[in-house]
Image (tube, helix red, strand yellow):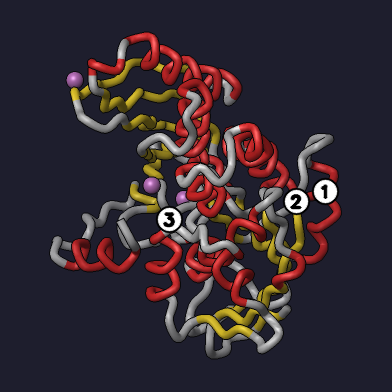
Amino acid sequence: MGPEDLKKVLHLLPPGELREEILVGLDTPDDAAVYRLDAERALVHTLDFFTPIVDDPYWFGRIAAANAMSDIYAMGGTPISAMNIVCFPCSLGMELLADILRGGLDAVREAGAVILGGHTVDDEEPKYGLAVTGMVHPERILTSRGARAGDALVLTKPLGTGVLSTALKAEFLSEEEIEAAVKGMAALNREASLAAGVAGARACTDVTGFGLLGHLAEMLSEEGPACEISAASIPLYPRTREMAGMGMIPAGAHRNRDFLQGRVEFAPGVDDVDRDILFDPQTSGGLLIALPPEGLEAMGDGLKEGKEWFRIGEFVAASRPLIRVTP
Ligand code: CO
Ligand code: CO
Ligand code: CO
């Protein structure tokens, strides 16, 4: 569902309950909720599931599970257990479903968590994901709010998964040609989250359906900070620019752009392709981290060999519009 529709339906409901144990609830834009058990421990709850974005059932399962656990990592937490959410047409055969579940299981094992059970629904279109429970120390919760002017903006995975999966569906690209993106989507945000914690991150969120600019907007407010990003510094999966240039833009990118109307300003040198990519909805995207300048080095040290992070912008004092994109 797009951000506009989601906002409408939430307005029709009573406000979230207030309880002192609810550390992060319905009143923030974060995708996971945090419930305090005691002074040392809080539970982090989230769930996510979606329709296949790649043809290979194993990799679909792995990506869906990595994506579902990502919101735990974005809160600075560690996944401890998960339940499978499965919608599946029995006519497709149980071997295919087993492959999806095996992919999910491998991702959950890699996270050091366990699958405890699940629920299946007979449905025409397959869907898979997880409900995940994680743990976090109540004083080490990272939310999307808390960035300050002067902090660096760091992104931990390239962009382009919406464009590339659109190109895959349209058969402009094969699954082999988007291998880097498939592996990237299946990668956990675990190291990035741990490194962000060690480096003293002030705010964190993950980049998913609302695109880079949509999720960045969640870290900003009219009272400040605002943010400046440089289009040239944004890492992209291979073939993303080429496919976006050919018009492989998912509908969600247009919804994201409409929703952010008036809140993003593009400097004249930023071309149309870059603009589209910045609104591209991502699946299992990287973390967006607000890091005080003195934390930049520790962030680099904290990430394992082979994992990358990219400094893509700077938080600045309150300004209008909220986000300025330079070439
Ligand atoms: Co999220
Ligand atoms: Co979701
Ligand atoms: Co049941």
In the picture of the structure, the residue carrying the numbered disc 3 is 30
Which mark sits nearer the N-terminus, 3 or 2? Answer: 3
Looking at the rendered structure, the secondary structure element under dot 1 is: helix
Kindly check if marks 1 and 2 are in contact, taking CB atoms under 8 A apart as contact: yes
Residue at 67% from the left image edge and 81% from the top image edge: 316
Viewer-side residue, 78 vs 211: 211
Q: Position of residue 134 (x, y in %)?
A: 46, 33
Please tell me which residue lies in front, 52 or 177. Answer: 177
Q: Amino acid at mark 2?
A: Trp
The answer to whether residue 279 is left or right of residue 25 is right
- Whether label 3 touches label 1, CB < 8 Å: no
Residue 254 marker = none
Residue corresponding to mark 1: 300
What x and y, as percent, mark residue 164?
56, 48
Relative to residue 23, is residue 113 drawn left or right? right
The kind of residue on which mark 1 rests is: Gly
Q: Quadrant of residue 120?
A: top left
* Residue named by callout 2: 309
Q: How many marks?
A: 3
Category of crowding for the residue at label 3, using alpha-carbon neighbours closer than 10 angstroms: few (below 14), some (14–19), many (at least 20): many
Answer with the quarter of the image where residue 275 lies.
bottom right
- In this orientation, which residue lies closer to the viewer: 155 or 198? 155
